[in-house]
């Protein structure tokens, strides 16, 4: 390994801040919608909060920094308490990824507003690069989590969404083989050759979407040289 951490050490403060933010918003979204739909399981567990310490998992956070993959504490949900079980379960599952998509879009909007107001151009080089690095991670990590969490493998949200869309008979069979799906997922994540043919294309897709968005905004606003940040994350 060229370095101990997955991310450049100089970017660690930014990536820690971003990961705390995106994981917290993601898990809060699950808990909030479940509570609003009549299930107080997450509420009683103290998960309907924006306190990062409630949502972050120590091991999952460490692994994310070291190997690029991690997790937060899953939100406990009891779908039997929903009035419309299937529809509300899908919304609760989708709330996490959608929150990442919205947060990424919001981050991009704020950054371009700051740019148009001249805040960036009037800042010192250090402040400029700090803002550039923070918003780069904020946008790309949220975009990555949005795409990644829609993969239909347990324990990702995409699996639960697909399961609730399928007929009951098929869903029960999927749930009976849930452990196999989780084993496959872990093998994909931690075995490099499998990761290269499965997760790497997702990283590439995320990178391409990000570049397309930047090109679109640069056609409207003052161009910004995002490539001043020399990082490996999402690098083609």
Image (cartoon, grey):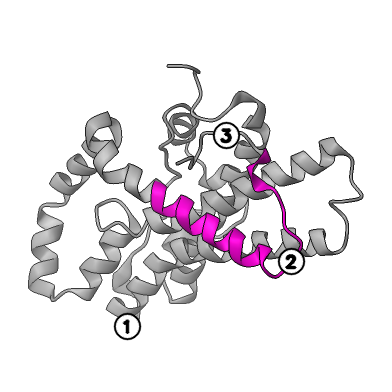
Residue at 68 percent of width and 39 percent of height: 228
Q: CA distance from mark 2 to mark 1?
A: 44 Å
First to last magenta residue range? 204-228
- Secondary element under disc 1, as helix, strand or loop, is loop
Q: Which mark is residue 84?
A: 1
Residue 132, by quadrant, is top right
* Rendered position, 133 above or below 163: above
Q: Residue furthest right?
A: 122
Which SS type dominates the magenta stretch? helix
Say whether residue 166 is left or right of residue 16. left
Q: Which mark is residue 139?
A: none
Q: Nearer the viewer, mark 3 or mark 2?
A: 2
Q: Earlier in the sequence, mark 3 or mark 1?
A: 1
Q: CA distance from mark 3 to mark 2?
A: 24 Å
Q: Callout 1: 10 Å neighbours few (<14), some, many (20+)?
A: few
Residue at 40 percent of width and 67 percent of height: 94
Residue, disc 2: 221
Q: Which mark is residue 231?
A: 3
Say whether residue 122 is left or right of residue 88. right
The percent coordinates of residue 164 (x first, y second) are 24, 71
Say whether residue 81 is left or right of residue 43. left
Q: Nearer the viewer, mark 2 or mark 1?
A: 2
Say whether residue 108 is left or right of residue 38. right
């Amino acid at each position: 390994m060229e370095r101990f951490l997955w991310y450049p050490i100089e970017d660690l403060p930014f990536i820690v801040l971003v990961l705390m933010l995106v994981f917290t918003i993601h898990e809060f979204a699950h808990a909030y919608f479940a509570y609003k739909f009549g299930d107080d399981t997450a509420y009683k567990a103290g998960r309907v909060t924006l306190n990062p310490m409630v949502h972050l998992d120590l091991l999952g956070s460490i692994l994310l920094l070291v190997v690029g993959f991690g997790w937060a504490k899953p939100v406990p949900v009891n779908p039997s308490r929903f009035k419309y079980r299937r529809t509300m379960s899908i919304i609760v599952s989708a709330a996490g990824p959608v929150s990442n998509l919205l947060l990424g879009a919001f981050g991009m909007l704020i950054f371009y507003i700051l740019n148009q107001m001249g805040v960036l151009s009037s800042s010192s080089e250090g402040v400029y690069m700090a803002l550039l690095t923070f918003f780069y991670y904020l946008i790309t990590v949220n975009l990555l989590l949005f795409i990644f969490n829609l993969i239909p493998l347990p324990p990702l949200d995409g699996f639960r969404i697909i399961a609730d869309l399928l007929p009951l008979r098929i869903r029960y069979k999927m749930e009976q083989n849930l452990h196999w799906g989780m084993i496959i997922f872990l093998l994909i994540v931690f075995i490099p050759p499998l990761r290269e043919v499965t997760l790497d294309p997702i990283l590439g897709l995320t990178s391409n979407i990000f570049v397309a968005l930047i090109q679109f905004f640069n056609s409207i606003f003052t161009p910004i040289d995002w490539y001043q940040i020399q990082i490996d994350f999402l690098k083609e």
